[in-house]
């Protein structure tokens, strides 16, 4: 028996969700040992957690980005149950492939994360998504734990930095409709750059956070070495003790002593904060487009459009990739691109040097770094 973990926002959230799962499992094991003098079967760390996620990637990963990919967009998924129409679900393996022109990091994550990755496919609407999640939770045998890196799942819909509220709200609504006990966990308040740390801490008041240890963060290290995630990378960096300002692709984010926290709150409280989730539960739109229209109406942000962000022109990787770079030249350029920040994400570093996210491992080699974010100050 285990719990079903849901990476609320897709993209790089499975990495942070794994860190959260390791942290929550360790906490449950500690409690169980204290109460029963032996670890519970469902918290056995050797058993890979079930992590469900949208295949909803950034445009540089998925050139067709405009919403989440579904089962029809992949070859090589492993199917469980009666198929998506009947409430079954699909899982990724390292052999899964996105059908061009779509792109996805999830097959590679299936090989590099010690977890079993399941596909949340909302293409047939909220009711079908609810059945999928119910089937996944039944397969896991436990409760549902939603993990959101950064905390925009607690949006009030009017924050000036808000970019992508729809996926999180859809997750909340579907989990509510399953009727299965669900807890929402906010990891690294403010680290996605959409809602500030202080407003989120006020919304989380009274819910005491867990603080993951470095061993939990290390579970995602292999994937963080190449994945363009920023929010999960920032959370891992904060857990490892990094503090100060970090230049990301969208903004400058501050890592503080509150950044490593993993805050739990009941599903009902999360929905009480989120007007889109409340409207989805009340209106129960029949299609994904209808659900996206609800989100657009309430927030002014198109639910299925590409992430609303500051776009920077992208050059193709120079011939030879990073071969033309030396460390001193690269660091000088990155200092200029960091806007005075103490650190820079590897995603933004690659972008600033005219590289793609696929060049991140080679760039790390040039910069001689294996940390989640690159330190710029001496």
Image (cartoon, rainbow, N blue to C red):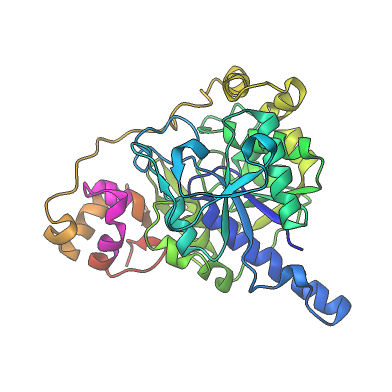
**Res 267 quadrant in image:** top right
Relative to 114, is 68 above or below? Answer: above
Q: Is residue 349 magenta?
A: yes
Residue 211 appears in the picture as rendered:
no
For the residue pair 278 and 200, the one nearer the viewer reads as 278
**Residue that appears at 46% across and 64% down:** 112
Residue 30 appears in the picture as rendered:
yes
**The C terminus lies in which quarter of the figure?**
bottom left
**Res 175 quadrant in image:** top right
**Percent position of residue 189, x then y:** 60, 49
Q: Is residue 84 magenta?
A: no
Magenta residues, dominant SS class = helix
Q: Residue furthest front?
A: 82
**The N terminus lies in which quarter of the figure?**
bottom right
**Residue that appears at 33% across and 33% down:** 311
Q: Is residue 313 left or right of residue 8?
A: left
**Res 33 quadrant in image:** bottom right
What's drawn in magenta, residue-wise? 348-364
**Percent position of residue 102, x then y:** 38, 38
Relative to 6, is 281 above or below? Answer: above
**Percent position of residue 228, x then y:** 39, 52
For the residue pair 115 and 334, the one nearer the viewer reads as 115
**Residue that appears at 77% across and 57% down:** 141
For the residue pair 233 and 132, the one nearer the viewer reads as 132
For the residue pair 52 and 363, the one nearer the viewer reads as 52
Q: Is residue 96 left or right of residue 259?
A: left
Q: Residue furthest bottom?
A: 37
**Percent position of residue 301, x then y:** 52, 23
């Amino acid at each position: 028996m285990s719990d079903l973990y849901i990476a609320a926002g897709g993209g790089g959230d499975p990495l942070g969700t794994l860190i959260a799962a390791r942290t929550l499992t360790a906490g449950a094991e500690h409690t169980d040992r204290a109460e029963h003098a032996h670890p519970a079967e469902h918290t056995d760390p050797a058993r890979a957690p079930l992590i469900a996620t949208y295949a909803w990637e950034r445009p540089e990963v998925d050139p067709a980005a405009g919403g989440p990919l579904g089962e029809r967009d992949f070859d090589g998924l492993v199917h469980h149950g009666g198929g998506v129409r009947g409430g079954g679900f699909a899982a990724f393996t390292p052999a899964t492939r996105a059908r061009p022109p779509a792109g996805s990091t999830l097959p590679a994550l299936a090989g590099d994360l010690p977890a079993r990755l399941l596909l949340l496919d909302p293409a047939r609407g909220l009711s079908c998504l609810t059945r999928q999640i119910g089937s996944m939770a039944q397969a896991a045998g436990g409760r549902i734990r939603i993990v959101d890196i950064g905390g925009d799942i607690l949006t009030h819909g009017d924050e000036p930095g808000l970019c992508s509220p729809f996926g999180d709200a859809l997750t909340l609504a579907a989990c509510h409709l399953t009727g299965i006990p669900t807890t929402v966990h906010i990891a690294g308040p403010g680290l996605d750059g959409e809602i500030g740390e202080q407003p989120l801490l006020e919304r989380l008041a009274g819910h005491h956070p867990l603080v993951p240890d470095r061993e939990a963060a290390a579970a995602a290290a292999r994937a963080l070495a190449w994945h363009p995630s920023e929010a999960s990378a920032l959370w891992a960096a904060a857990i490892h003790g990094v503090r100060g300002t970090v230049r990301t692709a969208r903004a400058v984010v501050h890592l503080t002593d509150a950044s490593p926290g993993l805050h739990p709150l009941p599903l009902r409280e999360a929905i009480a904060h989120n007007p889109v989730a409340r409207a989805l539960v009340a209106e129960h739109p029949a299609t994904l487009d209808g659900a996206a229209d609800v989100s657009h109406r309430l927030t002014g942000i198109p639910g299925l459009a590409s992430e609303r962000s500051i776009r920077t022109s992208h050059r193709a990787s120079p011939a030879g990739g990073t071969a033309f770079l030396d460390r001193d030249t690269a660091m000088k350029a990155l200092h200029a691109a960091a806007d005075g920040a103490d650190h820079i994400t590897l995603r933004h570093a690659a972008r600033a040097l005219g590289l793609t996210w696929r060049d991140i491992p080679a760039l790390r080699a040039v910069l001689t770094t294996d940390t989640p974010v690159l330190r710029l100050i001496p």
